[in-house]
C-alpha cells in the first residue's frame, strides 16, 4: 500500500527525511523484512537502506532482529509515535539542561567577549539581514522585544495585529512593565486584541494600513517586504537592520506622521 502525500508530509513534520519515510512505510506494509527487500520495495539505494534503518531504530520506529541476514520489524504506528515522543522529550530536556549549565559557566563570558570584539570590527552597513518565514520574523521580534529598553513603535495590518497578540503580547507586557513605551498603529477590528494592547500601549486606529514596520529603541527596524494577505506565512519576508539612521531618521518620521493623522483607540 502506498502512503498518501498527506501521510508522508506528516512523517516529515516529525523529523523523518525522504528515505526514512519511504523505508518506514514500506516496512509497515511488509511487517518484517531485510534491508535488501526494503530497498527494492521503497526504491531507495541499497547502500543507503542500512543507514536509514539504523537511524529509524535509533528514533524508535523499528526493531532490529539479530538474525542472518538481519531483519527489521516495524513497530505499530501508535507505539512508534509514543517512543519517538519519549526520545524527543528526553533529548530536549538533556539539551535544555546543558544550555542552562552553559549560561552559568565561564564559557559564556568567553563567548560574549569574542562577540563584542567581533562587533567592534563590523561596519554598521553589515548589521542587516533578510528574514524569510513568519516564524523567523517572530523569532527576531521576540529577541528585540525582550531586550527593548526605551520605545517600541509598531505599524501593522489587521492580520499583523492578531499575529502580534498571539505571539508577543506576554513579552510586550513584561517589556512595558519595565518602563518601555509602546505605540501601535493598526486597523482596529479585533477589539479583544486592541483592548488588551490598550492596557500596555497607546493604540491608534489606522483604517487604511500601508504595511508593517517596527522600530525598537530608535536603533532596530524591521520592515515587511510582502503583503500578509497575499502570501503564505512560510513565504513572508522582512528586512531587518540595526541602524539608528534608518530607524530614527527614515522609518520613524513616517510613523510619526501617520500617528498624528489618526485617532486614539477608545
Image: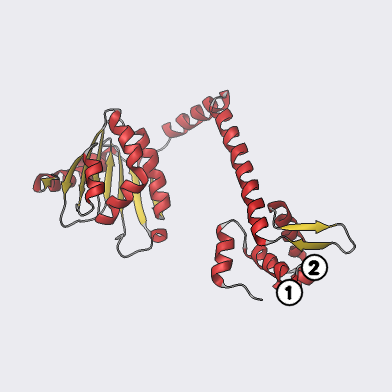
Give the Cα distance between marks 1 and 2. Answer: 10 Å
Where, quadrant-wise, is the N terminus in this rendering? bottom right
Q: Is residue 155 visible?
A: no
Can you name the residue that lies furthest to the bottom here?
A: 1
Q: Position of residue 15 (x, y in %)?
A: 60, 56
Where, quadrant-wise, is the C terminus in this rendering? top left
> Circle 2 is placed at which residue position?
33
Q: Position of residue 55 (x, y in %)?
A: 71, 55
CB atoms of marks 1 and 2 within 8 Å: yes
Q: Position of residue 167 (x, y in %)?
A: 37, 46
Give the SS element for disc 2. Answer: strand
* 138 left or right of 149 in image: right
Q: Quadrant of residue 92?
A: top right
Can you name the residue that lies furthest to the right here?
A: 68
Q: Is residue 241 above or below residue 217?
A: below
* Identity of the residue drawn at 43% across and 34% down: 119
Dot 2, crowdedness within 10 Å: few (<14), some or many (≥20)?
many
Earlier in the chain: of badge 1 and badge 2, it is 2
> Circle 1 is placed at which residue position?
41
Amino acid at each position: 500500500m502506498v502512503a498518501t502525500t498527506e501521510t508522508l508530509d506528516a512523517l516529515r513534520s516529525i523529523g523523518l527525511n525522504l528515505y526514512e519515510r519511504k523505508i518506514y512505510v514500506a516496512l509497515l506494509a511488509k511487517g518484517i523484512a531485510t534491508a535488501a527487500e526494503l530497498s527494492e520495495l521503497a526504491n531507495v539505494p541499497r547502500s543507503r537502506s542500512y543507514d536509514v534503518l539504523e537511524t529509524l531504530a535509533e528514533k524508535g520506529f523499528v526493531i532490529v532482529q539479530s538474525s542472518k541476514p538481519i531483519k527489521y520489524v516495524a513497530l505499530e504506528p501508535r507505539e512508534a509515535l509514543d517512543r519517538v515522543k519519549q526520545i524527543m522529550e528526553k533529548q530536549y530536556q538533556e539539551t535544555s539542561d546543558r544550555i542552562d549549565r552553559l549560561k552559568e559557566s565561564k564559557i559564556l563570558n568567553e563567548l560574549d567577549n569574542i562577540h563584542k570584539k567581533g562587533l567592534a570590527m563590523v561596519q554598521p552597513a553589515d548589521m542587516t539581514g533578510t528574514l524569510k518565514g513568519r516564524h523567523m520574523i517572530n523569532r527576531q521580534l521576540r529577541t528585540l522585544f525582550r531586550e527593548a529598553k526605551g520605545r517600541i513603535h509598531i505599524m501593522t495590518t489587521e492580520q499583523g495585529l492578531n499575529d502580534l497578540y498571539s505571539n508577543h503580547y506576554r513579552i510586550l507586557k513584561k517589556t512595558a512593565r519595565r518602563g518601555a513605551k509602546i505605540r501601535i498603529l493598526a486597523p482596529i477590528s479585533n477589539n479583544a486584541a486592541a483592548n488588551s494592547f490598550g492596557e500596555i500601549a497607546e493604540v491608534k486606529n489606522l483604517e487604511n494600513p500601508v504595511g508593517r514596520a517596527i522600530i525598537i529603541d530608535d536603533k532596530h527596524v524591521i520592515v515587511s517586504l510582502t503583503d500578509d494577505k497575499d502570501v503564505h506565512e512560510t513565504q513572508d519576508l522582512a528586512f531587518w537592520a540595526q541602524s539608528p539612521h534608518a530607524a530614527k531618521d527614515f522609518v520613524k518620521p513616517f510613523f510619526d506622521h501617520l500617528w498624528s493623522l489618526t485617532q486614539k483607540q477608545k
